[in-house]
Image: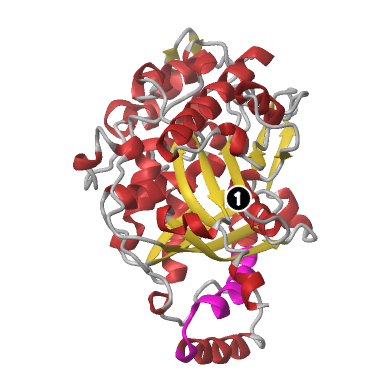
Amino acid sequence: MFFQKRNQQCYMLGYECFKAADDRKLDTDACVKVVLRNKNLGLDQYRFLLKTIVSSGLGEETYGPRNVIDGREEFPSENDAHAEMDEIMFSTLDTLFEKTRVSPTEIDILVVDVSLFSPAPSLTSRIINRYKMRDNIKSFSLSGMGCSASMIAIDMVQQLFKTYKNQFAIVVSTESIARHWYCGKEKSMMLSNCLFRNGGCSILLTNKRNLRDRCLLKLKCAVRTNIGYDNEAYGCCIQVEDPQGYQGFLLTKNLTKAAAKAFTGNLKLLLPKILPVWELLRYAISTLGKKSTKGQNLSFNLNLKSGVDHFCLHPGGRAVIDGLGKSLGLSEYDLEPTRMALYRFGNTSAGGLWYVLSYMEAKKRLKKGDKILMVSLGAGFMCNNCVWEVMKDGLEDTRVWEDCIDEYPRRDVVNPFTEKYSWIKDECMNFVRINGRMFY
């Protein structure tokens, strides 16, 4: 059993995040152009968008899909979606194969997770065709898993490693934005336009022990929680059509409650795997004390830093980060990588965690033996978390942060929308014309 378990380890050889061209940046002026093109919006929606964008935590340098930049968001084509996926998948994979010196023909397992785009042939087949991979490769396409899909893919590879020895595995995590830009006027569905941006990541994993000296990280454990049995949780983050027939992603007020329930349940399984004995005793006492209370409380009276050194949280938005930070008792130093990843790249869905990890590496925070907790939340509703161990010192590849890491952390992250467009909130605007439309 000892030798069998030793040969079932999951090591990370490398990862590469996607960074679009500068002409794809959605700065203040570009966002305003997109908003004004939507003829369904009125002054009330403008005010809502101003409030949402200002409080989102996103900066001026996030990236949008090409068709949105070009003004074709209302009528996207199949080619737009394929072009978006090809750019993200192939650019990250090209760099990953080059840096790790692993040939595409050596890959044994391929997992691609994209929630909102599932074409035929599949995206895995598209990759296999591009790189002429072997005919006996084990390929899997995951859809509908939301922002937590990357952790599901990682856990899936880990389970396969228990059966297949001496394997190379690739995980590609991204999201399709090009065909899913919401063009209606429902406030609960406009939130996704304010938060989600282009991004993605490709990760190379292996269970070959002779390569462990080359590896960056080792997976210690992974825990998945799905509370889809709860109707409120199931419907709090869901793809629907609005009354006008516009398709989009609905985010309801139950989202916070669902996240709390899933997160609490996940931690109760995860913490015993990562905390030392003295903290486990406190955990047991805390759990027993909460059995008599109603509802889900995210506050754990535990010192998580006794078992975890770094916290890689899902950069879903400022409110998500604040909530997770408060529940875990984290400092601003702990939250800095997540806040800066959100500010620079936005919510890139399943790929978001890897931008946070890349920031930690670029800032030279990671040391041999350190433990990294990755926390992801996604539609379903799901909470999927895992813990990695740093395998060596000297991790300092800047990757997508290369041209700007010295400018971070940003202390002043005020969105310029406040300065440029705060006049929209003025009551006198109820009687003016904006972009050819009269408001009363």
Asked whether 291 or 406 is in front, the reply is 406
Q: Position of residue 414 (x, y in %)?
A: 28, 40
Residue at the disc numbered 1? 148
Asked whether 139 or 85 is in front, the reply is 139
Q: Is residue 204 above or below residue 321?
A: above
| Label 1 Cα neighbours within 10 Å, binned few <14 / some 14-19 / many ≥20 | many
Q: Position of residue 206 (x, y in %)?
A: 56, 52
Query: Is 173 covered by the magenta stretch?
Result: no
Residue 213 visible in the picture = yes
Q: Quadrant of residue 422?
A: top left
Query: Is 273 covered by the magenta stretch?
Result: yes
Q: Secondary structure at mark 1?
A: helix
Main secondary structure along the magenta-highlighted residues: helix
Asked whether 300 or 395 is in front, the reply is 395
Asked whether 431 or 46 is in front, the reply is 46
Residue 315 visible in the picture = no
Q: Is residue 236 above or below residue 435?
A: below
Task: Name the residue: 60% across, 52% down.
Answer: 154
> Which residue type carries mark 1?
Ser
Q: The N terminus is located in which quarter?
A: bottom right
Task: Name the residue: 31% across, 38% down.
Answer: 401
Image: magenta residue range: 261-278
Task: Name the residue: 33% across, 46% down.
Answer: 340
Q: Position of residue 299 (x, y in %)?
A: 50, 75
Q: Is residue 437 above or below residue 149?
A: above
In-image side of 287 versus 361 (left or right): right
